[in-house]
Image: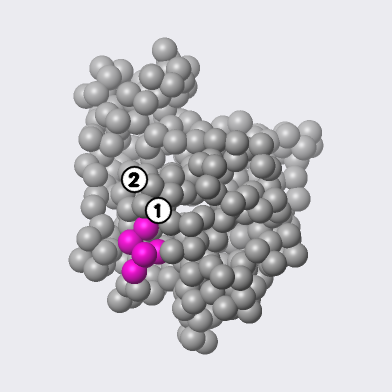
Amino acid sequence: MKVFTTGATGFLGNEALKTLHARQHSLTALVRSPQRAAGFPAEVRLVPGAIEKTDSYRDALKGHDVFLHIAALVKMWSRDRKDFDRINVDALENAIQASAKAGIPRFVYVSSFMALGPSDGSPLKEDDARRVDHTHNDYERTKYLADLLAREYQQQGHPITILYPGVIYGPGNMTDGNIVAKNLVPFLNGKMPFGLKLQPWSYAFVQNVVDGLVKVVENQPPSSRYILGGDNKSGPEFYQIVHEITGKMPPAINIPFPMATFAGYMEYLMAEWFRKEPQLMTHEVARIYRHAWALDSSRAVSELGYRITPMKEGLIELIAWLKNSGYVK
């Protein structure tokens, strides 16, 4: 099968590319920087360009069987807020249209659990109505708008499958999308004494998500939208599991959310003034942390054979990888 993919230098995208290559698929990858793709298998065809610049990849689309769209702007802040709209929304629509004009029979769009909104109650299913009437930051806002856009194209008859991964964790590229690993590193190195008492989030082991994605790429699934989540665990439950694995005690102090929001706002103002990426969180992210983001992956389990790795099993593998890779001393 010939697969055109975006986002292959990211956390999930790189793991998906390696698995698809191992399964003997012919791969074409759109990459902003060929240097970041230096470790790709030699058989992967590279197309230098960017998802928001349709002209950079349009001529490379013909002859493919699947357009796999993983690329997104996954950040809490950008120097130009319009980047979120250009990359997460406008570029998706242009990709769908370019794929259709090139005659590609299937389009797989990897969205995000944040497109569905907080659960704040029972775990969310694919067809549940959104439970809040607002979004919290530009990433969530544009993933929500992109989801509405993709669903609209589905209704018009475009062969689109939408996937909603949970909070993806596991070994892999340490990009902004690998948030669990990036937060574990300072904690395990004794440089993060404070925490937040989070409600349940859905933690999806990266290889589970990749396996679900590959099954959608290789087959024509019965449904057009799938949640690819994992164990729903609260913050205290997460750190208890880490403690059982490593012996590290959970953070001694949980910062009250009003204090976290204030500190995040100060960091946001510093980013705006000095045009420099925030280091911890913004006030918008602190507001996201107030909610539960639990997911129900039963549709994917029943229709795709999707597997959910127990969190302890997944964290054992991740922590061992962090130590072997030198991130944790």
Q: Is residue 267 above or below residue 151?
A: above
Residue 300 appears in view:
yes
Q: Which residue is mark 2?
A: 207
Q: Which residue is mark 1?
A: 24
Q: Is residue 135 left or right of residue 218?
A: right
Circles 2 and 1 in contact, beta carbons < 8 Å? no
Q: Is residue 30 above or below residue 267?
A: below
Helix, strand or loop at mark 1: loop
Q: Residue at x 49, y 63 (%)?
A: 2
Q: Earlier in the sequence, mark 2 or mark 1?
A: 1
The color scheme shown is one colour
Q: Residue at x 60, y 36 (%)?
A: 38
Residue 272 or residue 307, whichever sits in front: 307
**Residue 31 percent coordinates (x, y):** 64, 49
Examine the image and state in which quarter residue 295 appears.
bottom left
**Residue 143 percent coordinates (x, y):** 55, 61
Neighbour tally class for label 1: few under 14, some 14-19, many 20 plus, Cα within 10 Å = few
Which label belongs to residue 166? none
Q: How many marks?
A: 2
Helix, strand or loop at mark 2: helix
Question: Disc 1 marks which amino acid?
Answer: Gln
Residue stretch in magenta: 214-219
Q: Is residue 104 left or right of residue 298?
A: right
Q: Residue at x 63, y 79 (%)?
A: 101
